[in-house]
Image (cartoon, rainbow, N blue to C red):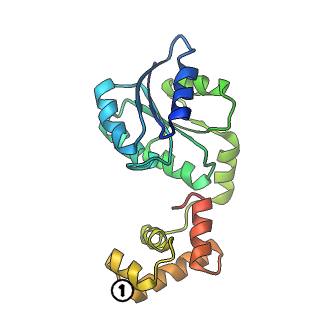
């Protein structure tokens, strides 16, 4: 099995390579540290499976999953992350991922999970799958997510409106709706709650 690894932390990436290459039937054919390097590296090396982190410079692993499944439909994608958020799981599966695993899972499970994904199975961390079912769908609209992201650093409503080419009233309406949907009291709390659930 030919594997591409996308992980921005060099030590973690090196450990993954060393771990996987202990297996006779696994070979790491590409390593990248940025999301925007995934598709070019995959085109050059034609991996069977891509193992992607979520948070990387140059585009996150979820965006890279969408691009990779479009560019190389035969390449399976497994998201491997520290962030056990139900929203991330839903977004990864919607983007075309075949697996979603947490970095704190036992290392012995990784090679087996990659083999199962290559065989056509979906492999998802069981605890996270249960959490995703209990939390339900992401209630935020695309525009509400845009507004929350723009407001995350505490930018005034006017700045958010200018950045997104919206009126101040529209920004306030989206913020109010997002606050209500997240069950919070302020936009900063709404941003935090949405991030914790993987909705942003």
**Residue closest to the far bottom:** 169
**Location of residue 123 in the rendering, given as x and y in whole percent from the top left corner:** 58, 34
**Location of residue 153 in the rendering, given as x and y in whole percent from the top left corner:** 50, 71
Taking depth in this image into account, of 110 and 10 the one nearest to the observer is 10
Residue, x 43% and y 67% (percent of image)? 142
142 relative position to 87: left or right: left
Residue, x 44% and y 71% (percent of image)? 150
Residue, x 51% and y 71% (percent of image)? 152
Q: Is residue 155 above or below residue 17?
A: below
Quadrant in the rendering for residue 146: bottom left
**Location of residue 23 in the rendering, given as x and y in whole percent from the top left corner:** 56, 14
Q: For mark 1, does the 10 Å Cα neighbourhood hold few (<14), some (14 to 19), or many (20 or more) residues?
A: some
Residue, x 54% and y 75% (percent of image)? 178
Q: Is residue 62 above or below residue 48?
A: below
Q: What residue does disc 1 label?
A: 167
How many numbered discs sit on the rendered protein?
1
**Residue closest to the far top:** 24
Taking depth in this image into account, of 38 and 99 the one nearest to the observer is 38
Quadrant in the rendering for residue 19: top right
**Residue closest to the far front:** 11
Q: Tell me the element at label 1.
A: loop
Quadrant in the rendering for residue 33: top left
115 relative position to 131: left or right: left
């Amino acid at each position: 099995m030919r594997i591409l690894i996308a992980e921005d932390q060099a030590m973690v990436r090196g450990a993954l390579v060393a771990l996987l290459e202990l297996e006779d039937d696994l070979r790491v054919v590409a390593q990248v540290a940025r999301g925007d390097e995934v598709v070019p590296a995959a085109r050059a090396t034609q991996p069977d499976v891509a193992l992607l982190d979520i948070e990387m410079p140059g585009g996150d692993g979820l965006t890279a999953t969408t691009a990779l499944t479009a560019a190389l439909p035969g390449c399976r994608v497994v998201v491997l992350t520290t962030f056990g958020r139900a929203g991330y799981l839903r977004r990864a599966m919607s983007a075309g991922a075949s697996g979603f695993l947490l970095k704190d899972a036992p290392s012995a499970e990784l090679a087996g999970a990659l083999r199962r994904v290559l065989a056509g199975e979906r492999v998802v961390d069981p605890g996270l799958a249960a959490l995703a079912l209990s939390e339900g769908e992401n209630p935020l609209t695309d525009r509400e997510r845009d507004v929350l992201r723009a407001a995350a650093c505490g930018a005034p409503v006017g700045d958010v409106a200018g950045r997104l080419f919206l009126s101040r009233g529209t920004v306030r309406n989206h913020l109010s709706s997002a606050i209500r949907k997240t069950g919070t009291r302020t936009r900063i709390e709404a941003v935090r709650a949405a991030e914790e659930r993987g909705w942003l």
